[in-house]
Amino acid sequence: MTYSYDYPRPAVTVDCVVFGLDPTNSLQVLLIQRRLPPFVEQWALPGGFVQLDEALEQAARRELQEESGISGLFLEQLKAYGQPHRDPRGHTVTVAFYALVNLWSYQIKAATDAKQARWWPMEQLPSLAFDHEKIVQDAIATLQASICHRPIGFELLPKKFTLTQLQRLYEIVLARPFDKRNFRKKLLKLNILIPLDEKETNVTHRAAQLYQFDQAKYMERQKTGFNFDL
């Protein structure tokens, strides 16, 4: 027997805030340019309507794949937004997710109802459709709160990285500088890094040692967290 509700209800969408760290060490946000109304040709977060019999995270991953070509990334639910007039098409509740990627591993390509897909520096974001500016601000606040208690920042780095790159990541996300000696001392004390018998290549300065995160410790820390008191 099929049950149908006899009262109106809002539609449900998902939107994704995807952060990446580019080679010049600036925090980037993935945006798509809308092909369809409303907000034709305006920039927005990748996302769309949840299909029947589709879980929220499944919908978020599908929309990311369809609109930007990105798949298989760290993704976490952020918050729900349900102001009645946030979408001119009608009352639409969106569930936002945020994702972290390193830009060395992904090539973006616009598809379906996205006219373009590109990375934008956080400090140079264009005017966004719907209430996506609010969603982006909430996502960066969540990222800043999480990065000192969970090792999610590593998702923004290449597989092999220097301690300078790691420190720069924290400085960019948290928007403040750190003392080099104290930062490294506290970080190495967490015992989540593997020093490699390799150094940087193709650099004009003295080549620095490369590191890799310990996958087992990383997964453990993802569950238990840590207090990286910076």
Image: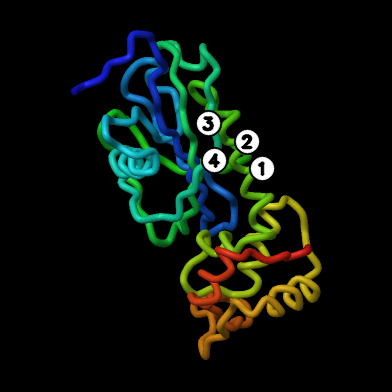
Residue at mark 4 to residue at mark 2: CA–CA distance: 11 Å
Which amino acid type is marked by label 4? Leu
On screen, residue 48 above or below 68: above
- Tell which circle, 4 or 1, labels the residue nearer the N-terminal end: 4
What residue sits right under mark 4 in the picture?
A: 78
Image location of residue 228, percent across then percent down: 73, 65
Extreme residue in the top direction: 7
What residue sits right under mark 3 in the picture?
A: 80
Image location of residue 40, percent across then percent down: 37, 18
- Circles 3 and 2, Cβ within 8 Å, touching? The answer is no
On screen, residue 13 above or below 30: above
Task: Compare residues 129 and 55 and report the one nearer the observer.
Answer: 55
Tell me the SS state at disc 2: helix
What residue sits right under mark 2 in the picture?
A: 137
Task: Compare residues 84 and 19 and report the one nearer the observer.
Answer: 84
Residue at mark 3 to residue at mark 1: CA–CA distance: 15 Å
> At x 48% / y 41%, what residue is drawn?
97
Label for residue 20?
Answer: none
Which amino acid type is marked by label 2? Gln
Image location of residue 74, percent across then percent down: 45, 55
> At x 68% / y 50%, what residue is drawn?
145
Other-residue count near label 2 (Cα within 10 Å), few / some / many at <14 / 14–19 / ≥20: few
Asked which quadrant contains residue 15, the reply is top left
Choose mark 3 or mark 1, whichever is in front. Answer: 3
Residue at mark 2 to residue at mark 1: CA–CA distance: 6 Å
- Circles 2 and 1, Cβ within 8 Å, touching? The answer is yes
Tell me the SS state at disc 4: strand
What residue sits right under mark 1 in the picture?
A: 141
